[in-house]
Amino acid sequence: MTIPKNKQDAAIVLAAGGSHAEAAKAAGVERQTVYGWTSKNQEFLGELDRLRRASFEEAEGVLRSMAVTAALVVREAIQDGDVKVALTVLRGLGILVNAEKREVDTRVQFAGDLSKPITPETHTIAEAHAVIDHFSKSN
């Protein structure tokens, strides 16, 4: 179903995050007319919903395409010795629990010392890699 060009123009502006006033200007109508379309006009609301979904799907596709690049950047940071990044990844994967919420209950043997929680202050990047290796083998 095709809607009139002025409604299409208003829907495009609203779907892009514009205001009702901006949509009205684009459509060549009063702001109150756009408010009416957004509250009562099923044809307009359907088009607005379609445009918002398309915009969301496009943004999601762009973000998904950047996931590999982001993973490579994280990997490089870990390989360069960034313990905070390594621990953030481990926490995000559920391997470590945020120390502020509760003490880390999973310990991996590092030079015989099992008493310290795994934190950037107490463990090196090599030890963080050992945690990853340990959990990779056990899963």
Image (tube, helix red, strand yellow):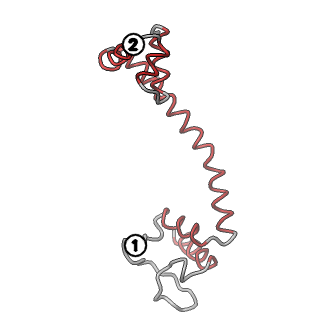
User: Is disc 2 placed on a helix, strand or loop?
Assistant: loop
The residue indicated by pointer 2 is: 30
Residue 83 on image: x %, y %: 59, 73
Quadrant location of the N terminus in the rendered image: top left
Residue 126 on image: x %, y %: 64, 78
User: Is disc 1 placed on a helix, strand or loop?
Assistant: loop
Residue 26 on image: x %, y %: 50, 16
Which sits earlier in the primary sequence, circle 2 or circle 1? Answer: 2
Q: Nearer the viewer, residue 30 or 40?
A: 30
Residue at the spot x=49%, y=23% of the render? 13
Residue at the spot x=42%, y=11% of the render? 29
Q: Nearer the viewer, residue 18 or 124?
A: 18
Residue at the spot x=42%, y=21% of the render? 21
The residue indicated by pointer 1 is: 100
Q: Marks 2 and 1, how far apart in space? A: 53 Å
Instruction: Say whether residue 19 is left or right of residue 84.
Output: left
Seen in the picture, residue 85 relative to 45 is either above or below; the reply is: below
